[in-house]
Image (cartoon, helix red, strand yellow):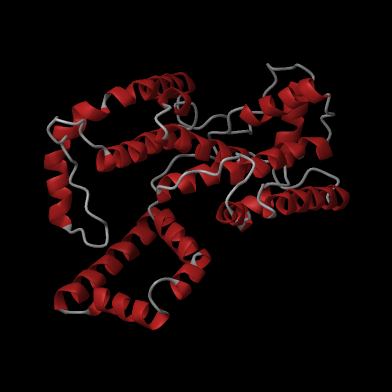
Amino acid sequence: MSSLYPIFCILCITVLKEVNTVVTEPYMDEPFHIPQAQAYCRGEFSTWDPKITTPPGLYVLSWILKRLFLFKCNVSMLRLTPLLTLLALPLALTRLLCYHKRERPPASITSPLVEAIILSAFPIAWFFGFLYYTEVPSVTLVVWTVVAASEGKHWLAASTNIVWVLYAYASSQLVFLRFRRAPAGQPAPAKLHDPPSLVAGPDDLLRSMINFPKVLPDILPAFVPYTLVVAAFGAFVVWNGGVVLGDKSNHIPALHIPQLYYFVAAATFFGWPVLLFGKESPDVLLREVRSRMFGNKTRTFITLAVCGVMGVTVKLFT
C-alpha cells in the first residue's frame, strides 16, 4: 500500500471529525438532502422533497450503509457517506491514469498512485467530501464508469449519467480504434483519422467525418448496453416533462456557452505547475502561445475573430 494513502485516509477522517464538531447543523444545501436521507432511513421511500433535483442514489447508499452497519442517520453519520466515496476516489483515478498512460495498474487495488491521491485532494472535491452532497459520490461513480468502459466492461459502464455514459463509450472506442491490431495473417483494420489536437486543422475534422463510416461497424457492438441508458433517459424526459428532476422552476435548462470559458480558466489556474514545470520552460511556452495567436496576419485575424465570438456568446448566453 502506498505510504501516502493511509495518511490521506487519516487526514480525511480527522477533517470530517473536525467539521462535525464545528458544523453541527445542516450546512448550505444539506437542509434539503439530510431530511430526505432520513426519510429513506425510516423506510419512507415515497417521500420526496420537490426542491431536490438529483436522483436518490446518495440517499439509497446511506440507507444501505445503515442496514449493513447499523449506522445512525444523523448529520455526522450521514456525512460519512460522501467521505467513503472520497476515500475510494484515488483507487478509481489510479485505474484511469494507468489506462491513459498505457501502464499496468498496481498489483493491489489499495495501492493508489501518488498522482491519484493528489488529484483526489482537488479543492472542490475535497470541500464537498465532508458535506452531505452528491458531488463526490457522482465524481467517483463517473470515474469508475469511464474505467469500466475503457476495460471493455460496457454492460457495467452503462449505469450512470447519460452524458458521462456517452463520454465513457466514445473515449473507450477512440482508444480502441487507435491501438487495435489485426490478427496474424489478416489485413489491417480500418483506422479513424484522429490526429493530435495541437497539429489538427479544419480539414482534419472533415477527413474524420468522411472516414468515420468505415470504422462504425467495428464500434457499434460495444454501444448495445448504452442504448438501454439512452432509451431510459428518453422515457424519463417524456414522463417527467423535462430533463430536471424536482424543482423545474429554478432549474431551467439553458444554453450556457460561457461555461466552457469558465472550465478552461479553472483548468489553467489549477494546472499552473504543469505550465511552469513542463517539458518547455515558461518563456518558451509564452513565445509559442504568442506565435499561435499573433504569429502572422492570418493568426491575428483568427484570434480577434474568436475574441469577438466569445464576447457575443458572453453577452447572449450568460
- Look at the image and tell me whether residue 132 can be seen: no
In terms of image quadrants, where is residue 43? top right
Q: Position of residue 164 (x, y in %)?
A: 44, 37
- Look at the image and tell me whether residue 130 can be seen: yes
Q: Of residues 82 and 297, which is closer to you in this image?
A: 82
The residue shown at (26%, 37%) is 180
Q: Position of residue 204 (x, y in %)?
A: 15, 53
In-image side of 145 versus 72 (left or right): left
**Above/below status of 316 relative to 49:** below
Quadrant position of the C terminus in the picture: bottom left
In-image side of 294 versus 160 (left or right): left
Q: Of residues 306 and 278, which is closer to you in this image?
A: 278
The residue shown at (29%, 22%) is 221
In-image side of 192 versus 108 (left or right): left
Q: Position of residue 167 (x, y in %)?
A: 38, 38
In-image side of 40 versus 152 (left or right): right
The residue shown at (68%, 16%) is 46
In the picture as drawn, the residue positioned furthest to the right comes out as 21
**Above/below status of 37 relative to 27:** above
Number of callouts in the render? 0
Q: Where is residue 198 in the image (x, y as percent from the top left)?
A: 26, 62
Q: Of residues 239 and 173, which is closer to you in this image?
A: 173
**Above/below status of 48 relative to 91:** above
In terms of image quadrants, where is residue 306? bottom left
The residue shown at (20%, 58%) is 200
